[in-house]
Image (cartoon, rainbow, N blue to C red):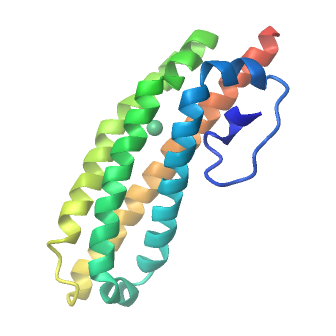
Amino acid sequence: MKQLEISSQGGTATQSKTGTRMLAVNAAFLKDIKDDNQDLKKLLDQITPITRHQQTAANHWPELITLMSDLRDQLALHFSLEEAYGYFDDAIVSAPELSVTAEVLRSEHPSLFANIRDLADQVSEICSDRPDQVNDFIARFDAFRRDFEIHEESELKLILDSLDDDLGVGD
Ligand SMILES: [Fe+2]
């Protein structure tokens, strides 16, 4: 059912026989986080091709400044949604052994947000006709994107582990 769309990020929805209970718990969360994930994916899909090469980035610098600002704001919403709707808490309740993982993932939000905030600030200070500065920015953004992807994949795994635990207990 729909709970597996949480982190599908535009991928295919997966069916689950255990969906009813989780859907009831997280109905509001699902709608908001799905909208957020679509907006987030759209932004990353716009930024990624622009930041693939130095000259492409330089040619699109004003657009990139706007997109980085939008990404910072979207990630502020993204992290606050995850924390406000508390799927971490669901994971902890359903499987206490997952609580350490949940805490580690939640503790990553401030540093991830600090990184994207700094990148959004820096992009507006860089001279786009300086290839060294543009390349440095691209490298730092790539590092952020990898860290964020690992974080998101770990959250998806946490949710799936939690659902597996529910299935193991039996509904
Ligand atoms: Fe997160």
Q: Is residue 121 left or right of residue 75?
A: left
Number of numbered discs on residues: 0
Q: Quadrant of the C terminus?
A: top right
Q: Is residue 90 left or right of residue 13?
A: left
Instruction: Determine whether 12 is above or below 93 in the image.
Output: below
Instruction: Determine whether 103 is above or below 56 in the image.
Output: above
Residue 123: give x, y in percent of width and height: 23, 70
Q: Given the current orientation, which residue lies at the most extreme right position?
A: 17
Instruction: Determine whether 20 is above or below 135 in the image.
Output: above
Residue 37: give x, y in percent of width and height: 53, 49
The residue under the point 55% across, 54% down is 38
Residue sitting nearer the eye, 2 or 127: 2
Q: Given the current orientation, which residue lies at the most extreme left position?
A: 125
Instruction: Determine whether 20 is above or below 55 in the image.
Output: above
Q: Is residue 109 left or right of residue 119?
A: right
Residue sitting nearer the eye, 10 or 136: 10
The residue under the point 18% across, 71% down is 124
Q: Quadrant of the N terminus?
A: top right
Residue sitting nearer the eye, 126 or 75: 75
The residue under the point 21% across, 90% down is 129
Residue sitting nearer the eye, 31 or 96: 31
Query: Would you identify the image quadrant in which residue 28 lies?
Result: top right
Residue 54: give x, y in percent of width and height: 36, 85
Query: Would you identify the image quadrant in which residue 138 lies?
Result: bottom left
Residue 131: give x, y in percent of width and height: 26, 87
The residue under the point 54% across, 30% down is 29
Q: Is residue 74 left or right of residue 118?
A: right
